Image (tube, rainbow, N blue to C red):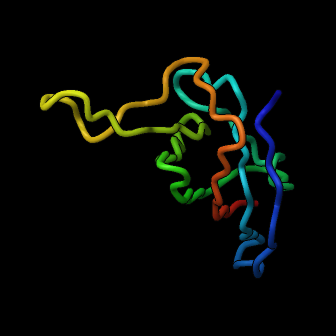
Amino acid sequence: MAVSVTVDERLKKMKGGRRRMRATVTMDDSYPTGGEALAASDFGLANRITDLIPRPASGYVPVWDADNSKLMVYTGDNDAVADGPGVEVADEGDLTDIAFVVEVQGD
């Protein structure tokens, strides 16, 4: 199974030919360490993603890594006092049916 992207709503065009949209990124059963790669073409964009703002879902916190074009996913790690506020989901972690709403800008 692969991560799927569904564009839910195309918002207004912006200056310079950029487009803005709201989409849903539905995760799969094998999250890779370092995040899931997302391309401009996944959102119907021709060139690049200039900004991607994800919303948390089901207790998971997504973070956009713009330098590598990857959606990283974090979860709480509260089993010890020394733990930080969150850790990345383990390699090949099962995030089946976890869906993140994202706002995307690009051209």
| Residue located 83% across and 46% down the image | 41
In the rendered image, residue 89, in percent from the top left (x then y), is placed at 48, 29
Any part of residue 19 in sight: yes
| The C terminus lies in quadrant | bottom right
88 vs 1, left or right, is: left
**Extreme-top residue of the structure:** 91
Q: Nearer the viewer, residue 20 or 84?
A: 84
| Residue located 72% across and 32% down the image | 28
**Vertical order, 39 against 2 (above or below):** below
Count of number-bearing discs: 0
**Vertical order, 38 against 18 (above or below):** above
66 vs 12, left or right, is: left
**Vertical order, 46 against 32 (above or below):** below
**Extreme-left residue of the structure:** 81
Any part of residue 63 in sight: no
Q: Nearer the viewer, residue 28 or 6?
A: 28
Q: Nearer the viewer, residue 2 or 70?
A: 2
| The N terminus lies in quadrant | top right
In the rendered image, residue 11, in percent from the top left (x then y), is placed at 76, 78
In the rendered image, residue 3, in percent from the top left (x then y), is placed at 76, 36
| Residue located 74% across and 61% down the image | 23
31 vs 47, left or right, is: left
**Extreme-bottom residue of the structure:** 12
73 vs 40, left or right, is: left
In the rendered image, residue 4, in percent from the top left (x then y), is placed at 80, 42
| Residue located 54% across and 59% down the image | 55
